[in-house]
Amino acid sequence: MGKRKSLLEKIYEQNPENGNYIIELSLVNYADIFNEWDHAPMRRKDIDPDLLRFLDDSIDDIPMKHNIDICCYFSDQERNVEREKQIASWFRTFYLFYIELEKKKIRRMIRKALICLVIAAVFFVLSYMGGLYVHNSMLLYILSDVVIIGGWVFLWEAITFLTFERSSIHQLIRNYRRLADADLSFRYK
């Protein structure tokens, strides 16, 4: 634990006021934050893909028990307080939007898992019922085994959706929440 913490402290500064780890971004100007191909109004712009990957990698480095701050260092930008407020608001909205998208994925996944559970139950009942009537027919016996295997496959799919896949999406939502809640500060050279 001590080795990981010291490594974390070597990579990320800690805010002396609140103890949050600071993800530092070195940018030229405000436009570097946004996707250069996205010509939508600022409130609907996407984040620059490289910056997005950097933030995703950085947030994975910092354990969940720690909050984060994000500090943008600009090398060729005049300070514009109004623009800073807009960017901070946009940044939070951007991640809140992606949180909602991931929640939709979870809802679809739960629906799909429930359908798989129902199909598995139907297959198990069919297999049981078939077992009652199959005595000397090899074809019906094989068909009964195929149905029970199908039931197990659908049951496994439901379990996979409800455990493994859902937990990875929950992790992503928690990271997006941390980014949305991060204090965003701006520094100029």
Image: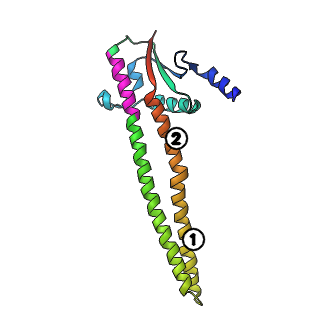
43 vs 2, nearest the viewer: 2
Query: What mark, if any, has residue 149 been given in the picture?
Result: 1
Depicted 174 relative to depicted 188: above or below: below
Q: Quadrant of the N terminus?
A: top right
Depicted 125 relative to depicted 33: above or below: below
Neighbourhood count class around disc 2 (C-alpha, 10 Å): few under 14, some 14–19, many 20 upward: few
Colour scheme of the rendered structure:
rainbow
Residue 142, quarter of the rendered image: bottom right
* Amino acid identity at mark 1: Ile
Left or right? Give the position of 57 relative to 96. right
Nearer the viewer's eye, disc 2 or disc 1? 2
x then y, percent, for residue 81: 34, 14
Q: Residue at x 44, y 49 (%)?
A: 106
Tell me if residue 166 can be seen: yes
Tell me if residue 35 can be seen: no
How far apart are labels 2 and 1 at the CA level?
Answer: 32 Å
Magenta segment, prevailing SS (helix, strand or loop): helix
* Amino acid identity at mark 2: Gln
Residue 28 within the magenta-colored segment of the rendering: no
Q: Residue at x 33, y 18 (%)?
A: 83
Mark 2, secondary structure of its residue: helix
Q: Which residues are magenta?
A: 82-95
x then y, percent, for residue 184: 44, 21
Mark 1, secondary structure of its residue: helix
Can you identify the residue that label 2 sits on?
A: 171
- Give the mark nearest the N terminus, 2 or 1: 1
